[in-house]
Amino acid sequence: MADEFNSTMVKTARTTFRILEAIKARDEATVTELTDEFALSKSSIHNYLKTLEHEGYVVREGNAYRVGLRLLDLGGYARHKQRLYQSAKEEVTKIAEETGEMTNLLVEEHGRGIYLHRANGEQAVKSDSYIGHRVHLHNTALGQAILAHLPEERVEEIVDRHGLPETTKNTITNRDELFERLERVREEGVAFDDEARLVGLRCVAKPIVNKEGEVEGAISISGPTSRFQGERYRTELPEILESAANVIELNINYT
């Protein structure tokens, strides 16, 4: 299996995807910049880019390349086929309208969190996340709500693979502390993020669990620390999420 994984064909495919990721990270990139990053010849990088351009995955603007909208087609299709997205999107939007805040729907894939849907109420603040954005699970309320309902060995695998990187001073970076937090989330049925990923942003999240007891994802409400305080933060918003989670779980279990 290892030999197959390291074959020339697989290495070429991996390089292709890494080039796309590098362009995304830079917003746009030139042949020279990618040559320096990948230690490949300019002709090799040029061949990769011309192939990606021909297939619609990158677009050339002057001397630079940016990610093309062909990828949006793949992402949109993947999201549309997600049962949880179809069951939860209306409830997530309703919560945003009711609270005036930003609401989110997250699923776990390959040990990372993927935003499937989000909606903004009238007072919603801006953040760095977007539909399709991948995040670590340990430093978000959404991620902790999911981790708390995964088998312990699966959580161990995720931590081993992705680590516990620090993004703010409030980020949990200790494995034992993380498992203590997940136990609390299970007991309380709700997860709280007190500026663990972004300074100034708090988040409340509830897991979505199917009738087999498996976690399908999580929903959350996010907002500034100035509005996420006291009774509203600790009681009112969790109750709104509890009601929405109940509807979503009924949708996924019996539709």
Image (cartoon, rainbow, N blue to C red):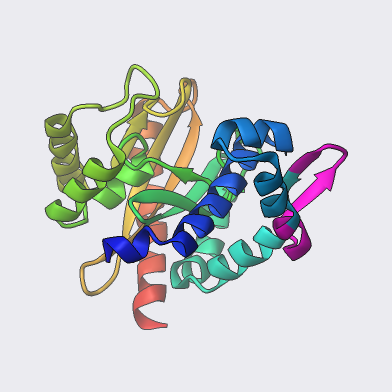
For the record, the magenta segment spans 51-65
Residue name at image x 63 percent, y 41 percent: 24
In-image side of 2 versus 15 (left or right): left
User: Would residue 244 be counted in the magenta stretch?
Assistant: no
User: Would residue 59 be counted in the magenta stretch?
Assistant: yes
Which x, y percent locates residue 19? Answer: 59, 46
Position of the N terminus, as image quadrant, is bottom left
46 vs 137, nearest the viewer: 46
Which x, y percent locates residue 204? Answer: 38, 40
Residue name at image x 46 percent, y 20 percent: 199
Question: Against 221, is 244 above or below?
Answer: below
Q: Quadrant of residue 43?
A: top right
Residue name at image x 41 percent, y 49 percent: 113
Residue extending furthest toward the bottom = 255
Which x, y percent locates residue 250? Answer: 36, 73
188 vs 77, nearest the viewer: 77
In-image side of 164 versus 59 (left or right): left
Q: Quadrant of residue 52?
A: bottom right
Which x, y percent locates residue 164? Answer: 28, 32
